[in-house]
Amino acid sequence: MRIVIQRVTEASVVINGELFSEIKQGLLILAGVEHEDTLADVEWLAGKTINLRIFPDEQGVMNRSVKDIDGEILVVSQFTLTASTKKGNRPSYIPAAGHELATSLYESYCSRLSELLGREVKKGVFGADMKVALVNDGPVTIIIDSRLRE
């Protein structure tokens, strides 16, 4: 799995012109699932996400996690994160998981984040055409790939 984490002061998802989800201070996470991903990837990424210290402490040092600040999380599925751009100018999405596996692992990731955070994790709609808005705080943007954990 590949995720892009953005520290935000607010973020939202609009579908068909209507507000679907929104958060205030916390993390907007874009998540892409590859066909070789498993629940082990979900578990590792969820733990990494919750404990990632990217929020400032009293001295302005990034020492706090989203859980430490009682922040919110919004997770949006984004299969384009799995793109391979090695050849030509048209991205290849061959590494992307099929709908069934991708949906299952995306939902598992969101559920596990919710358990670890102790509150509901907001979501987009898997496979929908979404308009995502955010105010990136910092800006702070972190990319994590579960294939690169060792």
Image (spheres, rainbow, N blue to C red):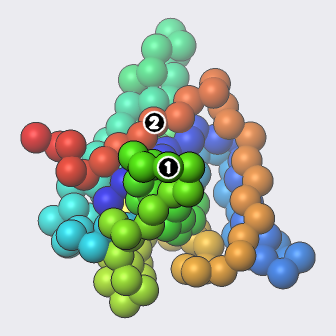
Q: Quadrant of the C terminus?
A: top left
Task: From the viewer's side, name the closer residue of 98 and 113.
Answer: 98
Categorize mark 1 by other alpha carbons within 10 Å: few (<14), some (14-19), many (20+). few
Task: From the viewer's side, name the closer residue of 117 and 10.
Answer: 10
Q: Residue 88 carries which label?
A: 1
Q: Position of residue 19 (x, y in %)?
A: 82, 73
Number of disc labels: 2
> From this viewpoint, which residue is outermost toward the right?
17
Q: Which of marks 1 and 2 is nearer the N terminus?
A: 1
The answer to whether the residues at label 1 and label 2 have Cβ atoms under 8 Å apart is: no
Task: From the viewer's side, name the closer residue of 102 and 54.
Answer: 102
> From this viewpoint, which residue is outermost toward the bottom?
100
Q: Residue at image x 38%, y 31%?
A: 53
**Alpha carbon of mark 1 to alpha carbon of mark 2: how far?**
27 Å
Q: Residue at image x 37%, y 83%?
A: 98
Q: Residue 142 carries which label?
A: 2
Q: Where is residue 70 in the image (x, y as percent from the top left)?
A: 51, 47
Q: Position of residue 72 (x, y in %)?
A: 56, 54
Q: Residue 115 carries which label?
A: none
Mark 2 residue type: Ile
Q: In this view, does 91 lie above or below 128?
A: above
